Image (spheres, helix red, strand yellow):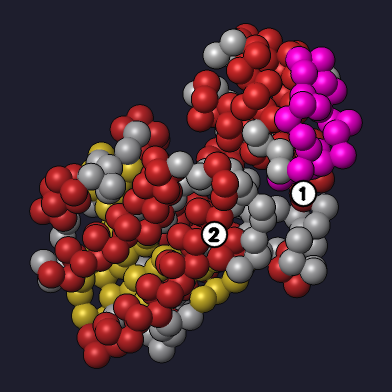
Amino acid sequence: MVLKDFVQVFAGQFDDTPVEEFTPSTIFMELEEWGSLVALSIISMIDEEFEKRVTGADLRSVKTIEELYNLIQTK
Amino acid sequence: MYNPFSLIGKKIFVTGSSSGIGASIAIESSKMGAQIILTGRNAVRLNDTFSQLDGKENIQIVGNLTNLEDIDSIIEQLPILDGLVLNAGVLKTMPVKNITTSAIEEVFNTNIISSIKLVQKLLKNKKINKGASIVFISSISSFNVKIGNSLYSATKGAINSFMKVLALELASQKITVNSIQPGFIKTRALSSGIITDEQLDAHAKIYPLGFGKPSDIAYACVYLLSDASEWVTGSVFTIDGGVTSNGGH
């Protein structure tokens, strides 16, 4: 999956935040909708799409969607 | 010595006994005099539990209870049982909107469907003695729920309901059927990466008595497997270090 598609799938885990607000440089934890349920959605989406396991600590170790994407590639 | 909790002379089958709660139940029951039959998927870990058992009559059977052929072959190798502990379980965390068919199948097959099939076949093959004890390991997650754990909670609730009906149906044979629902027990299954040590430490603070050890559950199981509990059936035992009394966090 290329970064552009990852941003789309990432945005799909949110219910209220408009898709247009998401770019590779979005600092996702600053989004108003961010919370534990969205975090669980992101973790299970990465498990499903990439067959890779990231932890809550992994999510906290990065800021932007692109950084998360890069982190997944190293797993 | 007077001991109403003795398991001497009892043949007890423990599923999911390669590690954690199942392993502890097997080990403690063997120390109370039972002959143990172990099963689990991982031969190396199963043998590790086996080597810690007391007594010389114990048996280990490597197998996957979610596989029907394995169930049939395991049942063939089993003696007539005086005790059965159904402990196999997996946890998969995801919000409902991200649930996949494979996750449903894995969690339900391992946590409840395999147990139902096993019990059905054991009864049909008359492998459960009159006066025997059956113990299901449920979880406080059956009622004390967390986001992301819908599949796990649903199976643990199903275990408690299934257990009660089974208790009624087997009462005429003096077979008792109960469940234990543990709170957080620190085991390998729950410390395999998703949860960090910091998160564990924070979680431990809401437990009035701290986290449990596998043996805290095993001792209750010994009671339910012994003749001391012959009038106890259809009951759910919450053993959780006080956490569900503490606002149910």
Q: Position of residue B202 (x, y in %)?
A: 81, 45
Q: Residue at x 51, y 45 (%)?
A: B99
Mark 2 neighbour class, 10 Å CA radius: few under 14, some 14 to 19, many 20 or more:
many
Q: Which mark is residue B203?
A: 1
Q: Chain of mark 2?
A: B
Return the mark for residue B153. Answer: 2
Given residues B72 and B158, the one toward you in this image is B158
Q: In x, y percent, where is residue A41?
A: 64, 38
| In the depicted structure, whether residue A33 falls above or below residue B208 | above
> Which structural element holds mark 1?
helix
> As drawn, is A34 to the left or to the right of B94?
right
Mark toward the start of the polypeptide (1 vs 2): 2
Q: Is residue A19 magenta?
A: yes
Q: CA distance from mark 1 to mark 2?
A: 18 Å
Residue at the location (79% across, 69% down)?
B247
In the image, B58 versus B191, the foreground residue is B191
Against B9, residue B192 (above or below) is above
Q: Which quadrant of the figure contains the N terminus of chain B? A: bottom left
The mark closer to the camera, 1 or 2, is 2
Disc 1 residue type (three-letter): His
Q: Is residue B89 left or right of residue B15?
A: right
**What x and y, as percent, mark residue B119?**
25, 65
Res. A32 in view: yes
User: Given the image, on which type of amino acid does mark 2 rest?
Assistant: Ser
Q: Check the residue under mark 1 and report the chain it is in.
A: B
Given contact means CB atoms under 8 Å apart, are the residues at marks 1 and 2 in contact? Answer: no
**In the rendering, at what x and y percent does residue A29 appear?**
84, 31
Which stretch appears magenta?
A16-37
Instruction: Please name the residue shown 20% across and 74% down the image.
Output: B129
Closer to the camera in the image, B200 or B62: B200
